[in-house]
């Protein structure tokens, strides 16, 4: 054992690259085999004719991408982008003040924990909590009926409103954390300088605070928009059959519709959308900071 | 620094905290309500919890979740930690590329990950079941663990390790006795987060689970869709309690903000 160990160390000392490679290998190989390869297979499948009972037949075709251009499917795509965008805006409007308050608070630890907690507790359970509140016999309707504000239960569940509420409920913490991180780093002397120079609160916010927290805002928008684009559970449980988002369309092609190649093509359209968003926001963030420190 | 915050911001903040936590609290409260159909409070009961114990599918699901969760967490924690070490300690040409590659599974929509794995397993004729679920969970957990441990590594003081080397420890000894003890909180936090993610996953699991084996979230999802027995409230409350406890532990162990980093 000892000699083995000495030999191993000698080998690693002679070939430093070997150490890095042996550390990298297990994780990287696993991700290659069970992430990269499946993605490539799916890409290939999106160009192949549909098999009889699910699966694919050999050959090459562009028909699935062409089919995606059908207004029916473009509508699903459009709805997905609009809802994800609306959820992002709502999260930003709600999340920014929260991040601001936390960054000024003496109880940051607790407040941050309360933001982080829901984002790691079961997404499914939290979505169910929304159903429990929103359904016809749910708490909201019962309370409103009891108070006499309405005489019949309102339809809240299975509406665009429910999906949007669910998205905001699910992804709001993703917005708060990065904005908080950049507000925390903000140098208070800059605000004092603005104050001394006579800037009113509104001007101080728009010329100092907001520009300096822009990296956090961009990161937060990315962290809400991207998972919202790919959301499945929220639209499935809160939106029902009418409020289909692109994730539900993909799933449907692999389960009931049994059209794998079309499902793969839609999957890649979604993936492309995600990657374009990520790239664009990274570029925005890494832009020379003339704009930010103006 | 103690500038006053505006009343509007405080109001929004209060509303947001209520919005984030009230629905789940309501759920938990009504898990001990005697009424079956209405949300009127008709008395305290633990019946719904008692009913859970009699549901074989839930117990099977729980068992599957625990197996998948622990195996995938163990493997992903080792692989992810090794990856983080390699990336933090070495400058090699492909480093940037590998780092970028590591973020891909995190940004890729779950539905896409699940579908692509399904395609792989079906093409290779791998029977779907606990094994395929575990393989999938390891894949998405590696990236989480690597990012959390990496954040911890970046904050570490390397001079301690260098001191150990100068005092005559060989590299493995220095690693084992100096680096690893400092790294433990990061590793444990990564593992807890991996376990919670695995324990909670529905989308990917449901796609690669096949017909025979369901994890707890897959069973619960079915219950939620069919609705509406208060037993769903009971099982939800239990899941919440367990995961909250794990998260609290992870939070205590790290103090920094690996949680934000993990999803970033």
Image (cartoon, helix red, strand yellow):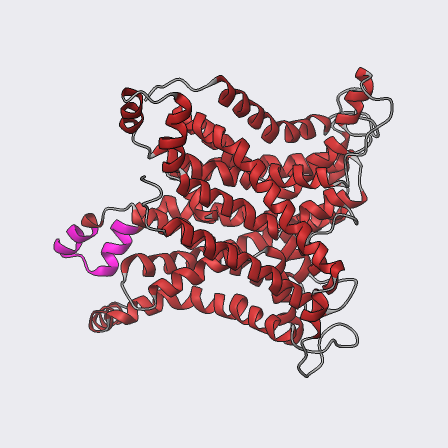
Residue in the image at 34% along x and 47% along y: B152
Q: Is B69 in the magenta?
A: no
In the picture, residue A77 is in which quadrant? bottom right
Q: Is residue B177 magenta?
A: yes
Q: Main secondary structure of the magenta part?
A: helix
Give the image quarter of residue A252: bottom right
The relative height of residue A87 versus residue A270 in the rendered view (above or below) is above
Between A151 and A30, the one lying in front of the other is: A151
Magenta region: B161-179
Q: Is residue B197 above or below residue A2?
A: above
**Between B181 and B252, the one nearer to me in the picture:** B252
Left or right: residue A50 compared with residue A29: right
Query: How many labels were placed on the picture?
Result: 0
Residue at 50% from the left image edge and 21% from the top image edge: B10
The location of residue A107, given as percent across then percent down, is: 42, 23
Q: Nearer the viewer, residue A83 or B251?
A: A83
């Amino acid at each position: 054992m000892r000699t083995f160990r000495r030999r191993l160390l000698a080998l690693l000392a002679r070939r430093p690259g070997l150490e890095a490679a042996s550390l990298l290998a297990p994780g990287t190989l696993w991700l290659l085999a069970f992430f990269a390869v499946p993605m490539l297979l799916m890409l290939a499948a999106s160009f192949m004719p549909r098999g009889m009972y699910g699966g694919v037949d050999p050959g090459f075709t562009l028909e699935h991408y062409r089919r995606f251009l059908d207004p029916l499917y473009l509508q699903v795509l459009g709805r997905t982008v609009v809802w994800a965008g609306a959820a992002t805006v709502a999260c930003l409007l709600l999340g920014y003040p929260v991040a601001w308050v936390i960054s000024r608070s003496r109880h940051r630890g607790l407040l941050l924990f309360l933001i982080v907690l829901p984002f790691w507790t079961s997404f499914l359970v939290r979505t169910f909590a929304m159903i429990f509140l929103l359904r016809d016999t749910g708490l909201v309707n019962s309370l409103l009926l009891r108070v006499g504000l309405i005489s019949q239960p309102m339809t809240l569940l299975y509406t665009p409103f429910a999906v949007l509420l669910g998205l905001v409920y699910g992804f709001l913490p993703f917005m708060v954390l990065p904005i908080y991180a950049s507000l925390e780093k903000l140098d208070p002397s800059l605000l004092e300088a603005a104050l001394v120079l006579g800037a009113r609160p509104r001007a101080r916010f728009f010329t100092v605070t907001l520009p300096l927290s822009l990296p956090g805002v961009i990161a937060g928008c990315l962290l809400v928009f991207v998972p919202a684009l790919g959301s499945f559970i929220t639209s499935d449980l809160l939106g029902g059959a009418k409020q289909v988002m692109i994730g539900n369309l993909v799933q449907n092609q692999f389960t009931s519709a049994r059209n794998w190649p079309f499902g793969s093509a839609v999957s890649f359209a979604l993936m492309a959308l995600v990657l374009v968003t990520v790239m664009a926001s990274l570029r925005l963030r890494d832009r020379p900071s003339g704009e930010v420190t103006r | 620094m103690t500038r006053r915050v505006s009343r509007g911001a405080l109001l929004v903040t209060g509303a947001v905290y209520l919005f984030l936590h009230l629905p789940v609290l309501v759920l938990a409260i009504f898990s001990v309500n005697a009424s079956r159909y209405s949300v009127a409070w008709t008395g305290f009961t633990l019946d719904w919890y008692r009913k859970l114990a009699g549901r074989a599918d839930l117990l099977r699901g729980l068992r599957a979740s625990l197996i998948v969760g622990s195996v995938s967490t163990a493997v992903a924690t080792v692989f992810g930690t090794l990856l983080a070490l390699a990336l933090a300690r070495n400058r090699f040409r492909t480093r940037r590329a590998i780092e970028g590659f590591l973020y891909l599974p995190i940004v890729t929509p779950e539905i896409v990950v699940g579908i692509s794995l399904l395609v792989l397993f079906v093409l290779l004729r791998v029977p779907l079941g606990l094994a395929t679920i575990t393989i999938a969970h390891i894949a998405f957990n590696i990236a989480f663990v690597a990012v959390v441990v990496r954040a911890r590594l970046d904050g570490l003081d390397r001079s301690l390790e260098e001191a150990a080397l100068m005092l005559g420890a060989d590299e493995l000894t220095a690693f084992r006795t100096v680096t690893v003890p400092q790294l433990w909180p990061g590793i444990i936090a990564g593992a807890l987060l991996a376990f919670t993610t695995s324990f909670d996953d529905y989308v990917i699991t449901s796609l690669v689970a096949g017909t025979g084996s369901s994890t707890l979230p897959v069973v619960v999802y079915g219950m939620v869709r069919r609705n509406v027995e208060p037993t769903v409230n009971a099982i939800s409350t239990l899941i919440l309690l367990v995961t909250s406890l794990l998260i609290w532990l992870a939070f205590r162990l790290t103090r920094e903000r690996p949680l934000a980093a993990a999803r970033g």
